[in-house]
Image (cartoon, rainbow, N blue to C red):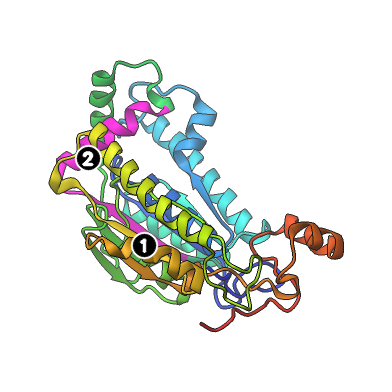
Amino acid sequence: MAALYKTASGRLFHAGAIAIVLVGLPARGKTHVSRSLCRYLRWLGVSTKVFSVGNYRRERLKSIPEDYFDPDNLDAQAERLTIADECLADMMEWLRVGGGQVGIYDGNNVTENRRRGIYKKLLENDIHPLYIESICDKPEIVLANIRSVKVSSPDYYGWDPDAAVKDYTDRIKQHELDYETISDTSLPFVKLMNVGERLIVNHVQGYLQSRMVYYLMNLHNRPRTIFFARTGNSVIENSYREDPELSQEGWDYAHVLKEFVIEYRAKKDGITGKSADEDRSLSVWAPTQKNGRQTASIFTTDPNIAVRHYSMVNQLNPGVVDGMTPEQINEKFPDEIERAKVDPYHHRYPRAEKRRKT
């Protein structure tokens, strides 16, 4: 994936500072959305950071009093607001002077008044807000989230699992008393229903925010395995311009790779006891370059395997170092080696700015 254009400040020139504000009741997958979206944006080359209100609270309080989330406990309510505002202020400071472009504010933010206050502060600091509300009306998903994630959080260290589930369920009920879904259509927002089952999009503007929405459309919370494999050896190693074919060793590797992946998946499915309807077909993403196409061609003999070719997974143009061994590059371009170590994602060797057309 080629990095998007950046200015000297490190920001994308066509998008200013952006704040993603999470909204929703506990156990609705907000933290999953935050971390997943953060990884995606960093993969795009965007400076992104998650600011978690829950983590701020745990760092400051260590343990939580039993009535801490009781709406009638005004002292605790004021303390929660102070911690949330501190987290928000740190995010804005990072976006203003810390070199960040997208800050993700992971909190509940369940009231319209709270969201309007955050919106005003962000605009005053020249930060573009985008709200993501995670809504789940399926109790089985909420309960599964509580059991798989929440009971293992630091809040419930040493607790009996059933007691932890009951306590967290009570916490959700306390938040429900104040919860107001986003209804202000002047706000830019995305409503994420049942972790991607349905999306409602309102006033989303700009290329980067649109990329986020596209990613959310493909978000899921089901575990799956991703294999990364190199293409097989070519008849001309270390050559980009020649686009060489696989060597015999490369073809042998491709056959072994297919056998390994199929056997590994079968063994894993047997251990986990997956049913037939849960079994997920294998999809192979391969480069459009010749050695990549040939490596993947071994998988096409199986009608149950989908092979797709994407230029985004092609080898990057190596420029002047094409055809050189690592030792030769280190000897001839020591300064470039150092630059690559400092910023490996964005570094390109001389005359390597553009991809070769395929």
Q: Which of 312 and 187 lies nearest the eye of the viewer? A: 312
Where is 204 relative to 232, above or below?
below
Q: Is residue 149 magenta?
A: yes
Where is 8 relative to 51, above or below?
below
Q: Is residue 39 magenta?
A: no
SS for dot 2: helix
Q: Which of 33 and 191 lies nearest the eye of the viewer? A: 33
Q: Position of residue 353 (x, y in %)?
A: 67, 78
State the residue position of label 2.
142
Q: Position of residue 168 (x, y in %)?
A: 28, 29
Residue at the spot 47% in from the left edge and 51% down from the top edge: 105
Image quarter of residue 101: bottom right
Asked whether residue 188 appears in the rendered view, the answer is no
Mark 1 / mark 2, whichever is N-terminal: 2
**Magenta part of the chain:** 129-153
Q: Mark 1: few, some, or many residues within 10 Å (few <14, many ≥20)?
A: some
Q: Position of residue 347 (x, y in %)?
A: 70, 66
Residue at the spot 57% in from the left edge and 76% down from the top edge: 243
Where is 207 relative to 24, above or below?
below
State the residue position of label 1.
298
SS for dot 1: helix
Which residue lies most toward the bottom here?
A: 357
Left or right? Give the position of 68 relative to 118. left
Check whether the beta carbons of the residues at disc 1 and disc 2 lie within 8 A of each other: no
Q: Amino acid at mark 1?
A: Ile
Q: Amino acid at mark 2?
A: Val
Image quarter of residue 233: bottom right
Left or right? Give the position of 75 relative to 3. left
Residue at the spot 74% in from the left edge and 66% down from the top edge: 324
Q: Position of residue 343 (x, y in %)?
A: 70, 59
Image quarter of residue 356: bottom right
